[in-house]
Image (tube, rainbow, N blue to C red):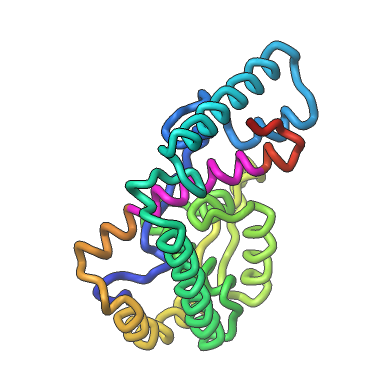
């Protein structure tokens, strides 16, 4: 069912770190992203003050590094970034690739009568089921989406008969997701076309390069989550250095 590189949606199960290293490799301690929301709403005085002090100190360190010429735009070191033009080209190339991949994903979904996101959730349930029971949280973590979003999507798939939901009789809060016979038939009908398109889309990569890219994406997603957490802190009124 997969091409020589495997489907992009199954390129790797990325586990996101809950710790937030606020600036580069300088950690602010174990601070989950939700901690920023706790600070915004207010928390216990001593813990909150320590947290804010740590964040402020790390930002000051970053600012001092910038003045020494050690850091550049986006917090990347000069030896990594090279120039702002290189950085912008990288970001815009990522935009371009993702836009094209989204077109392909939407086409995959259309081929079997689904939207692009619905197709991705359906095929993810099938892949994840190889390792054990699948639930909403399993899929949400795998795709880096919210549980509420996955719940809404799986409800649509359930209504159209592409998946089954099984409620644990001992604990009704536990719901297992599985691809139905209709869903399997749809994915099997798509497989030859999908495999060919995957081979073309990733033709530039050797197997080693593909694995390297997958590893880089895992790390970039973890770093991006830390960046989002810091941005949330700023947007919530956090103090900049």
Residue in the picture at 49% in, 69% down:
92
Q: Judge whether 55 appears above or below 50 on screen.
A: below
Residue 83 appears at what percent x and percent y?
41, 56
Residue in the picture at 64% in, 43% down:
231
Residue in the picture at 61% in, 75% down:
161
Residue in the picture at 58% in, 71% down:
117
Which quarter shows the N terminus? Answer: bottom left
- Main SS, magenta region, reads helix
Q: Is residue 155 left or right of residue 100?
A: right
Q: Quadrant of residue 237?
A: top right
Residue 89 appears at what percent x and percent y?
44, 67
Give the camera-side residue of 183 and 88.
88
Start-end of magenta stretch: 216-231
Residue 125 appears at what percent x and percent y?
48, 62
Residue 19 visible in this rendered orientation of the protein = no
Identity of the residue furthest to the right in this view: 41
Residue 37 visible in this rendered orientation of the protein = yes
Residue 175 appears at what percent x and percent y?
60, 51
Q: Is residue 99 left or right of residue 153?
A: left
Which quarter shows the C terminus? Answer: top right
Identity of the residue furthest to the front in this view: 68
Residue 72 falls inside the magenta stretch = no
Q: Quadrant of residue 10?
A: bottom left
Give the camera-side residue of 221 and 151.
221
Give the camera-side residue of 58 and 175.
58
């Amino acid at each position: 069912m997969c091409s020589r590189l495997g489907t992009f949606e199954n390129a790797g199960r990325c586990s996101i770190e809950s710790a937030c290293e606020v600036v580069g490799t300088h950690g602010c301690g174990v601070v989950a992203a939700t901690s920023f929301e706790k600070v915004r709403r207010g928390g216990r005085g001593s813990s909150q003050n320590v947290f804010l002090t740590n964040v402020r100190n790390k930002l000051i360190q970053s600012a001092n590094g910038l003045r020494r010429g050690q850091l550049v735009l986006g917090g990347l070191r000069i030896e990594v970034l090279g120039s702002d033009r290189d950085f912008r080209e990288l970001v815009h190339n990522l935009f371009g690739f993702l836009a094209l991949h989204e077109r392909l994903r939407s086409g995959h979904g259309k081929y079997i009568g689904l939207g692009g996101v619905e197709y991705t959730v359906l095929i993810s349930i099938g892949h994840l089921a190889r390792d054990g029971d699948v639930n909403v949280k399993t899929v949400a973590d795998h795709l880096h989406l919210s549980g509420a979003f996955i719940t809404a999507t799986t409800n649509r798939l359930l209504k159209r008969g592409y998946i089954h939901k099984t409620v644990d009789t001992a604990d009704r809060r536990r719901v297992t997701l599985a691809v139905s016979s209709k869903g399997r038939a749809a994915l099997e009908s798509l497989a030859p076309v999908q495999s060919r398109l995957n081979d073309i889309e990733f033709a530039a990569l050797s197997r080693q390069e593909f694995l390297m890219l997958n590893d880089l994406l895992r790390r970039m997603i973890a770093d991006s989550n830390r960046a989002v957490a810091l941005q949330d802190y700023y947007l919530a009124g956090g103090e900049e250095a």
